[in-house]
Amino acid sequence: MSATETGADAQIPAALTAPGLTPLQRLRAILGGSAGNLVEWYDWFAYSAFAIYFAQIFFPAGDTTAQLMKTAIVFAVGFGARPVGAWLMGMYADRAGRKAALTLSVAMMCVGSLIIALTPGHAQIGNAAAAILVVARLLQGLSVGGEYGASATYMSEMAGRSRRGFWSSFQYVTLIMGQLIAALVLVVLQQTLSKADLAAWGWRIPFLIGAGLAVVVFWMRRSMEESASFEAARAEGRSRGRTMLLFMQFPRETLAIMGLTAAGSLGFYAYTTYMLKFLVNTTGFSKPLAGAVNLATLACFMLIQPLFGALSDRVGRKRMLAIAFGGGALASVPVFTLIGATDSWMTAFVLILAALVIQSAYTSISAVVKAELFPAHVRALGVALPYALANAIFGGTAEYVALWFKSVGHESGFYWYVAGMMVMALVVSLLLRDTQKTSLIQED
């Protein structure tokens, strides 16, 4: 959407321009920011990847669909906490710095993962087990809500102007890598443990792994350098991270991020976390085969992010968004329909990958598009809050909505729901200015 005079078009007066980073310095900064991002998203997606095993531990009543719907509700509850985490951590990142927010977020994720790993099941403590699970997911939701905005902002600010799309794409590389590692752990445990052991106690292993990795990243992040954009805004003494400032001065940018995120998050979760359950519950694949297909598609999805990010540096962000959502609108219904009807893992793999390739035109530049819309003093909050709100409403409920359509006998309704949201985001994309040309990240 076009910029407002008081918002996106406004230039930061007397901005301090940091000297250009060397390639090695830039790489260290990107790796420092992304390592914690990987752990955050590993822990977050481990819940979804292993829900098919622990659903009966916390929710023993009902059939498989009913149990999965209850775990999906808890998954959505975690998403509900993400806007709160984004709001609090976004303000904190704009006031105390990106480094401080990133360190705090990974510490919170560590605690949440430990709680899930150590909580007894319904057979031991009754309904308290489900209640504790909800508390743990709320804590993880607060953590991830703050992580996305802080890491997206930090990585975009540390990337150089000429290759900002390429470098910032690693934000989604690590996001997908976290999910990929969760899926890989799932496959390994499926191959090394019996079904009984995996269902009884093996599902706790990935949460212990995630908590341990979070401790390592916590110490890594304590030695990170602050971004030049934040230092410049702090030196100017501009008011930072004020919620009303965001909605009053940048309403179009805020609404644009919500529109893009609504469709982008819905598509992402539909083709990744929900697809694992779709392959088992609808297509009829075994759990190990579904896990393997999911693992393979995620690996390819991860590897192509930098390619699309680099392409955006050449053709612009706006054109990439139009490709992502226009293509997604056309592909959603036939892709889901064909996957649901196939008995071939290769066909399923190709169809899922095709959908994810189209989605990559958005995911690869998701962070940088949002960061380029806002000046530094409100950037972390501007990236985090509207993203988290839309992500909670549309991404967090994706699995539940899909399972609800299936439970009432109209599963294809979910396919059309995804397609309709893609059309909405396409309209937003066409109205949005090309942030590659009008970026408000002025340092470097």
Image (cartoon, helix red, strand yellow):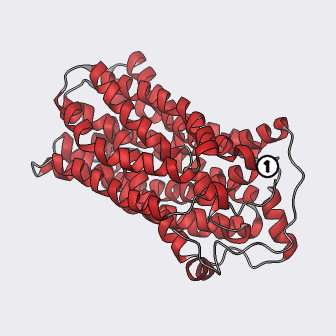
**236 or 315: nearer the eye?**
315
The residue beneath circle 1 is: 222
Q: Residue furthest left?
A: 409
Dot 1 amino acid type: Arg
Q: Callout 1: helix, strand or loop? A: loop
**444 or 182: nearer the eye?**
444
- Name which residue lies at 65% across and 64% down: 380
- Name which residue lies at 48% across and 40% down: 360
Image location of residue 61, percent across then percent down: 19, 47
Relative to 276, residue 428 above or below: below
Q: On the image, which quarter does residue 331 sit in?
A: top left
Q: Residue furthest front?
A: 315
Asked whether the viewer can see residue 391, the reply is: no
Image location of residue 306, percent across then percent down: 60, 35
How crowded pointer 1 is (Cα within 10 Å; few <14, some 14-19, many 20+) is rated as: some
Image location of residue 170, percent across then percent down: 63, 40
- Name which residue lies at 32% across and 46% down: 58
Q: Is residue 73 left or right of residue 142?
A: left
Q: Is residue 399 left or right of residue 41?
A: left
